[in-house]
Amino acid sequence: ARCEQAVLAMLGAELFGDEGLHAAAGATLSLAKSAHGPHAPLASALMAAVDGRMALSDNDIDRALACAQAFEAPLDVLASDRGAKAGGGRLQLADQRAARIDLLLACAVRLKDRSLVEVALAEARVAVAALDPDFEPLTWSRLELLRAEALTRLGDFDGELSLIADGVEAATQALEPLDPGHSPLDWARAQAGLGEALQMMGEATTSDRCFEQAVTCYDRATHIVKVQPALSLRAAVANNRALSLARCAELTADLAVLDAAEMAFKAELSAHPGARDPAGWAVAQMNLARLYEARVEITGRDDGRLDRAATALAVAFDVFAELGLRSLTDLAAQGLQRLKQANAA
């Protein structure tokens, strides 16, 4: 029961970026571990996941790597358990493998460490092979998305286009067993994962078509996540969508793309005043700021748009901070820092 409580708290922390829920999960798992019962290995794996997430939040990569290593012993026990081949035991093992792979990839991105990506990819292949997408579609899809991310990261490190293409194919496959009506958030997460893979393919090939396809994926994900402004996934989707639009315009030098995007965001801001949905309003401000930046980068002329971008980002930052939306606050802060550097150049 304590492990189940901790899993729910971790899910809430993942969805809404509430670090207090991680602390609550850690306290609950400490009690479960001390009981030394049959669920102690699961509690140990969950504790490694919680500590790893908190370490990443604190930007303590050494501690995060130690947490990834702390998964190994409980995963070995879970894998050797007689119930590991049964439905419930197999899913528990798969979920904890996914948590370790996710942690390894997060560390790899921050450290620019190719070897960590290779480890994550190898473990993802093993974990995916142990599942049947017909009977365990959600868990299989999550692991297939992690395999896709590992492939695209490895392709990015090596400059190997075929690996990125394999990542796009894997992300596409991860979507197949999902139904937006039955599991909307998993479907939205998979759309976002495919969008990221296409975005990486676009960067590797300088193909505006890839960025257009990425925008389509982000639009589909947005349709699901827009109803819950506190979702951490919403921040990533909103930011990547704006970046993809901007890159598409840069590659085509088509200011009409930016004009259309600017009009869409301004229409959204007019149709949904800040009082009704302050978080959504601030997200639109942040996206509009990124498009202002892109126009200046394309034309080489600043007609006041950088000042407008700074104003929009400052307002968005204040709203996100007031609402306690940490992931969105961080993105707005990064945008303000980017503008500061651009003005200093």
Image (cartoon, grey):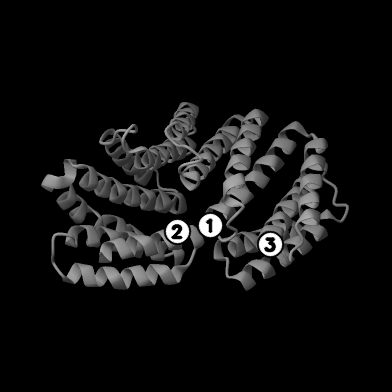
* Pointer 3 residue: 277
213 horizontally vs 304: left or right: left
Residue 40 percent coordinates (x, y): 18, 62
Q: Nearer the viewer, residue 129 or 252?
A: 129
Q: From mark 3 to mark 1, how far is it between C-alphas?
A: 16 Å
**Residue 170, placed above or below residue 33:** above
**Closer to viewer: mark 3 or mark 2:** 3
Viewer-side residue, 117 vs 276: 276
Camera-side residue of 180 and 144:
180
Residue at 85% in and 52% down:
302
Give the farthest residue toward the front.
181
Tags 2 and 1 in contact by the CB under 8 Å rule? yes
Q: Secondary structure at mark 1?
A: helix
Q: Which quarter of the image is occupied by the C terminus?
A: bottom right
Q: Is residue 113 left or right of residue 220?
A: left
Judged by depth in the image, the label closer to the viewer, 3 or 1, is 3
Above/below status of 78 relative to 48: above
At label 1, which amino acid type do we have?
Ser
Q: Do tag 3 and tag 2 residues touch (Cβ < 8 Å)? A: no
Q: Disc 2 marks which residue?
A: 14
Within 10 Å of disc 1 (Cα), the crowding (few <14, some 14-19, many 20+) is many
Identify the residue at image location x=39%, y=67%.
22
The residue tagged 1 is 232
User: How far apart are the alpha carbons under marks 2 and 1?
Assistant: 7 Å
Q: Earlier in the sequence, mark 3 or mark 1?
A: 1
Residue type at numbered disc 3: Asp
* Residue 66 visible to an observer of this rendering: no
Determine contact: label 3, label 1, CB under 8 Å: no
User: Cα distance, mark 3 to mark 2?
Assistant: 22 Å
Give residue 71's position: percent from left, percent from top: 25, 55
Residue drawn at the location 56% of the way across and 38% of the way down: 195
In the rendered view, does 295 fall on the left or right side of 234? right
